[in-house]
Image (cartoon, helix red, strand yellow):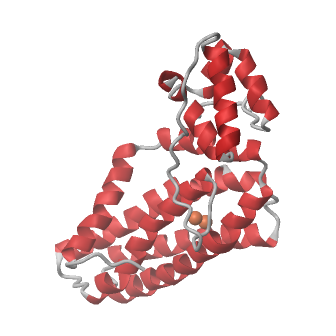
Amino acid sequence: MEQYLNTAIKEVITKFPNVGKILEEYEIGCVPCSVGSCLLKDVVEIHDLPEEEEQVLMARIAGEIYPGREIKVHRVERNGKNRSKELKYSPPMKRLVDEHALIKRWVALIPRVLEALDMKSAEDTYLILEGVNFIRSYADRFHHAKEEDILFKYFDENSELLKTMLEDHVKGRGHAKATSEALDKKDREGIVEHLTAYRELLTEHIKKEDEILYPWMDRSLSVTQVGELFSRFIEADEATDRKGIARCESFVLGVEKHFGKEVTK
Ligand SMILES: [Fe+2]
Ligand SMILES: [Fe+2]
């Protein structure tokens, strides 16, 4: 059974069409989903059925795959911790919240970086260059692109809430551009102005998304849409330059180390 838990759901359904019918009974719409790259275990985790229901579902799936054999299926491991005081996100939304965590780590470092910025130091100016690269590659192309190209398409993009979010993204790009131009001109003040503005903008933006937008979206999306979203995020991440993402992660870690300790907000 372990083997099939780690197989893409479309493949499982193609081989065992009745599995698709069973999932539909639980309102798990993997058959109409055009992506289907989620693993069977992801599908079970995403839909987060009560323990007893999950046991029945898994026993029925096992019965289709191994007819006539008694198969023990353990409860699928959950990645998320359901602490009562914490907001509970669906797996795709949790993925975005986790990406926010890295963005917040860089944003929290900005005041220290700016305070210590010596325009005559090649190391310092390189750090700003890498900081702008982080904003463009990670915050924008990796994270905001998933919101704009995938997530927001499930909602009315002319709604006030989404218009505000999209405007924030545009403003963020403006600050990255202005910081880069100030760096070319060796304009310390310009760098300070735009990176500070970026910090303020993103701090508020992330707070709004984590506390309002994503929970609202989670409440509005159907279980089928949540599954589809998760699958699309996986595909988008797989198509991303992983080396570039790793570079962004080690950039944040490097700056934290440089300043002696982790700065988190
Ligand atoms: Fe956003
Ligand atoms: Fe975001």
Query: Residue at 79% across / 58% down in the picture?
Result: 220
Query: Residue at 81% across / 32% down in the picture?
Result: 25
Above or below for 218 versus 228: below
The outermost residue toward the front is: 70
Quarter containing the C terminus:
bottom left
Q: Please state if 71 lies on the left or on the right of 111 as rendered.
A: right
Q: Measuring from the top left, give residue 85's x and y in whole percent.
A: 58, 74
- The residue lying toward the viewer, choosing from 185 and 76, is 76
Q: Is residue 116 visible?
A: yes
Query: Residue at 50% across / 66% down in the picture?
Result: 100
Quadrant where ligand 1 appears? bottom right
Q: How many marks?
A: 0
Q: Quadrant of residue 262?
A: bottom left
Q: Is residue 229 visible?
A: no
Above or below for 132 versus 12: below
Q: Measuring from the top left, give residue 237's x and y in whole percent.
A: 50, 44
Q: Please state if 106 lies on the left or on the right of 32 as rendered.
A: left
- The residue lying toward the viewer, choosing from 5 and 38, is 5
Above or below for 197 versus 103: below
Q: Please state if 263 lies on the left or on the right of 59 as rendered.
A: left
Above or below for 244 versus 8: below
Q: Measuring from the top left, give residue 28's x and y in whole percent.
A: 75, 37
Q: Quadrant of residue 106?
A: bottom left
Query: Residue at 64% across / 73% down in the picture?
Result: 211
Q: Quadrant of residue 196?
A: bottom left
Q: Please state if 256 lies on the left or on the right of 201 as rendered.
A: left
Q: Measuring from the top left, give residue 103's x and y in whole percent.
A: 45, 68
- The residue lying toward the viewer, choosing from 251 and 212, is 212
The outermost residue toward the top is: 68
